[in-house]
Amino acid sequence: MPAKIVSFFHHSVVTSDVAVTGTFASAKRHEHDLRAGATPGVAGQRFRERVEGITVRLSAVGSATKITIKVCLDAAGDDIVIPDVEATIATGVSTATKGAVAYAVKVPLFQSASGEIGKLYLFLKADNNCTVDRTTITWCET
């Protein structure tokens, strides 16, 4: 009988306000440390896992209708591992002032030597001004 293969899912959550506008900028990002809280044998290793999905929560939608993300290995946003992906904002049921977007990524990543160990940088831009207050990266051990 074959061995059962098990996937372990993890997440990185960053909660801080980002005033998002129509352009990418180094200040309009969330820094995700995917190795935070990792077991001692994994804590100092470069990231070689599969990013499953990314969710973005907006505390103030404003007149924005779309959010575009970009994921990089560096804080400057030049070592891109997930290129620009756009999604339409879904607004709340009882209020249109709050919203969210979600991205199905399913990309295996290997962190090159240029990136900080265990970190991914999620950059944000929108078609109009809005405020992002929480992003989550869900990943799976490969």
Image (cartoon, rainbow, N blue to C red):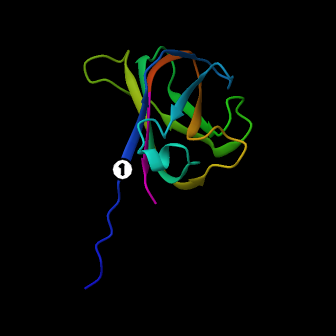
Q: In terms of image quadrants, where is residue 108?
A: bottom right
- Magenta part of the protein: which range? 135-142
Q: Residues within 10 Å of mark 1 (few under 14, many from 20)?
A: few
Q: Residue 21, how many percent across, how many down?
A: 61, 18
Residue 58, above or below 113: above
The residue at the far bottom in this view is 1
- Left or right of 20, for residue 88: left
Q: For residue 58, which quarter of the picture?
A: top left
Say if the magenta span includes residue 50. Answer: no
- Residue at 45% across / 17% down in the picture? 61
The residue singled out by tag 1 in the image is: 9
Q: Position of residue 68 (x, y in %)?
A: 58, 33
Secondary structure of the residue carrying tag 1 is strand
Tell me which residue sits at (35%, 18%) in the image: 96
Above or below residue 107? Residue 89 is: above
Q: How many marks?
A: 1
Prevailing secondary structure class for the magenta stretch in the rendered image = strand
Quadrant of the frame with the N terminus:
bottom left
User: Quick check: can you spot residue 104?
Assistant: no
Give above or below for 66 relative to 59.
below
Q: Is residue 8 above or below residue 59?
A: below
Q: Specify the amino acid type for callout 1.
A: Phe
| Quarter-of-image position of residue 121 | top right
Q: Position of residue 27 (x, y in %)?
A: 64, 18
Residue 71 in the image: state x and y as whole percent.
60, 39
The answer to whether residue 113 shows anywhere in this view is yes
Q: Residue at x 47, y 34 (%)?
A: 88
Q: Which of these two is toward me, 62 or 39?
A: 39
